[in-house]
């Protein structure tokens, strides 16, 4: 049976669930954002953008919950065999992930607020605007949102590449710490 909490060797099932749920939602979110941005002005575009905004706020909430869980349940240590530079790169990458996963949705929310495009979260309730309508600020936050998302997408590619390197080339167990199943040992 999987551990709920992290162990010294592996992430627990709750941390894994947060990781994979956020990862999946970010990929879906990137797809929806690109798709909606390329639609002509129409009801369909507004509907897709509404889903995009709702999903962005859901990701923001999940990331904040994940950070809370991480505070109460520290991650397992990286293997001592990893070089110092690689440990440092992993730490910086993870911190940058959290920063971008908070700032990108916030910039999108600020953009929607400044543009007068209020967010109705999955049709359940109206989310308050963070600032009043302001065309210049809307353009600024739109550009910021796009830039942060581009950085996030780049970081996702680096992260996946690093995970595959650890799992397929180095075979050092780092990737398996975030998987709900463990590889069989040939003892």
Image (spheres, rainbow, N blue to C red):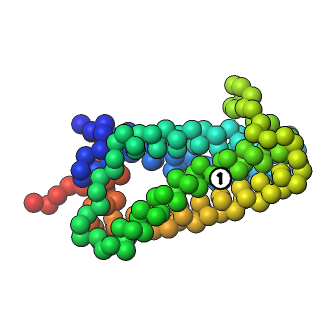
Residue at 20%, 55% in the rendered image? 184
Indicate the quadrant containing the C terminus: top left, top right, bottom left or bottom right.
bottom left
Dot 1 lies on which element? helix
Side (left or right) of 169 relative to 111 = left
Where residue 121 sits, quadrant-wise, is: top right
Q: Position of residue 91 (x, y in %)?
A: 41, 62
Side (left or right) of 33 relative to 184 = right
Q: Position of residue 6 (x, y in %)?
A: 30, 44
Q: Position of residue 32 (x, y in %)?
A: 69, 49
Indicate the quadrant containing the N terminus: top left, top right, bottom left or bottom right.
top left
48 and 78: which is toward the camera: 78
Counting every numbered tag in the picture gives 1
Q: Determine whether 84 is above or below 105 in the image.
A: below
> Can you see residue 112?
yes
Residue at 40%, 43% in the rendered image? 71
Q: Position of residue 132 (x, y in %)?
A: 84, 40
Looking at the image, the residue that sits furthest to the top is 124
Where residue 70 sits, quadrant-wise, is: top left
Where residue 43 sits, quadrant-wise, is: top right
27 and 149: which is toward the camera: 149
Residue at 24%, 70% in the rendered image? 81
Residue denoted by label 1: 104
Residue at 52%, 60% in the rendered image? 96
48 and 68: which is toward the camera: 68
Side (left or right) of 21 relative to 168 = right
> Can you see residue 44?
no
Label 1 Cα neighbours within 10 Å, binned few <14 / some 14-19 / many ≥20 = many
């Amino acid at each position: 049976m999987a551990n709920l909490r992290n162990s010294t060797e592996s992430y627990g099932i709750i941390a894994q669930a947060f990781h994979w749920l956020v990862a999946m939602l970010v990929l879906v979110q990137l797809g929806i954002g690109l798709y909606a941005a390329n639609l002509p002005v129409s009801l369909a575009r507004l509907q897709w953008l509404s889903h995009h905004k709702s999903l962005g706020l859901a990701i923001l909430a999940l990331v904040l919950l994940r950070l809370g869980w991480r505070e109460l349940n520290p991650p397992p240590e990286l293997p001592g065999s990893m070089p110092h530079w690689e440990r440092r790169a992993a730490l910086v990458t993870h911190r940058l992930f959290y920063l971008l996963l908070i700032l990108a949705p916030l910039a999108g929310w600020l953009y929607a607020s400044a543009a007068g495009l209020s967010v109705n979260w999955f049709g359940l309730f109206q989310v308050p605007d963070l600032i009043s309508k302001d065309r210049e600020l809307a353009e600024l936050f739109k550009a910021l949102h796009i830039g942060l998302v581009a950085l996030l997408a780049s970081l996702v590619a680096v992260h996946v590449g690093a995970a595959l390197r650890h799992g397929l080339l180095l075979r050092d167990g780092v990737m398996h710490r975030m998987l709900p199943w463990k590889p069989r040992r040939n003892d």
